[in-house]
Amino acid sequence: MPDQYAVIGNPVAHSKSPQIHAEFARQTGQNLTYERLLAPTDAFMEAARAFRARGGLGLNVTLPFKGEAFRLATLLSERARAAQAVNTLKFEGDTIFGDNTDGAGLVNDLARNLGCAITGRRVLLLGAGGAARGVIKPLLEQQPARLVLANRTFGKAQLLAQNFGGGLQAGTYAALAGGQFDLIVNATSASLAGELPPLPPGVFAPGALAYDMMYGRDETPFLAFARGEGAAALADGLGMLVEQAAESFFIWRGLHPDTAQVLKLLRQAPT
Ligand code: NDP
């Protein structure tokens, strides 16, 4: 019997995770299956427990269940605790281990695939939802010159700045006027709705990288704005998706797959 893994979410039909993990398993010679699990929005816990009961060894967790997965875990990594969100569950005996690999996925994509240094750079993070929370600690660990977080609902940004201590500064979008950043990461869901976060002009420093966590065939409004503002490089979140999957794969199987090869395959595949 192959070992069983899955991605659980709602919706989940669009997820590229089964394709990514199938390729990781092929590369590393692992005997496993990886399926999509659509859970009713009010029955995540039941669906996750049923998967475990039929022998499942691990789950990737996507929208809108990362908070519930955090509560389901009986043992948490430090980065999951900091994010208060879990995207990777590992079932081992009586233990349900919860981790968050989103931040490592972003940092590894920036470093390995995009050649973008974070240390000593001015970094702006947009959004204060699950995705933003997951990347704050890993970004701070890279010791940027400054890390500013702007959010439409300012109170949420303020709360995060309090929780993460001195390293993170909270700001409103309006207060960004006049500032410049070397890396701007869009971790809002604005792109999903075809919207642009209300960024003032002039925030991209010369040589800046604009990074949208969203991925897809079309350029997002944020990346189109960044292009118009003269950002030196643009990137979508496909690399982050592959890198966070590789971190999950390592947690489950103890092996590091070749992410560059999988990213190349996905870029070539029609969406
Ligand atoms: P959440 O729903 O938890 O958070 C959404 C955030 O976006 C909030 O901060 C919200 O602000 C803000 N927002 C929404 N619309 C707008 C707008 N029009 N203008 C400004 N801000 C806006 O979502 P997640 O954090 O889970 O996900 C965010 C994005 O990251 C999604 O596009 C998701 O697909 C992507 N993602 C990509 C991953 C990858 O591997 N590439 C991994 C995880 C997420 P407010 O607080 O004011 O409501």
Image (spheres, rainbow, N blue to C red):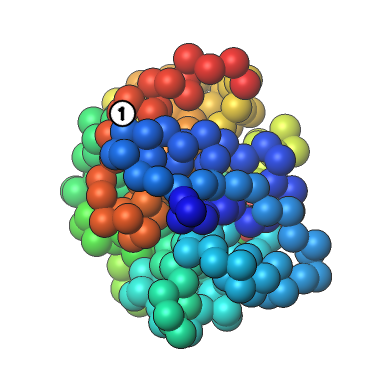
Is residue 217 depicted above or below 32 in this figure? above
Query: Relative to residue 127, is residue 135 drawn left or right?
Result: left
Q: x and y percent of residue 46 in the render?
A: 72, 74
Task: Find disc 1 in the rendering and name its residue.
Answer: 260
Count up the numbered dots: 1
Residue 91 visible in rendering:
yes
Residue 183 falls in which quadrant of the image?
top left
Is residue 115 depicted above or below 77 in this figure? above
Is residue 2 depicted above or below 243 in this figure? below
Residue 207 falls in which quadrant of the image?
top left
Instruction: Give the residue at x 43% y 21%.
Output: 265
**Which element carries disc 1, helix, strand or loop?**
helix
Q: x and y percent of residue 255 in the render?
A: 25, 50
Instruction: Give the residue at x 53% y 41%.
Output: 17
> Between 91 and 162, which is closer to the camera in this rendering?
91
Is residue 132 depicted above or below 12 in this figure? below
Instruction: Give the residue at x 53% y 47%.
Output: 34
Q: Which quadrant of the rendered structure holds the C terminus? A: top right
Q: x and y percent of residue 178 in the render?
A: 44, 42
Instruction: Give the residue at x 56% y 36%.
Output: 16
Q: x and y percent of residue 239 in the render?
A: 41, 34
Instruction: Name which residue type carries label 1.
Output: Ala
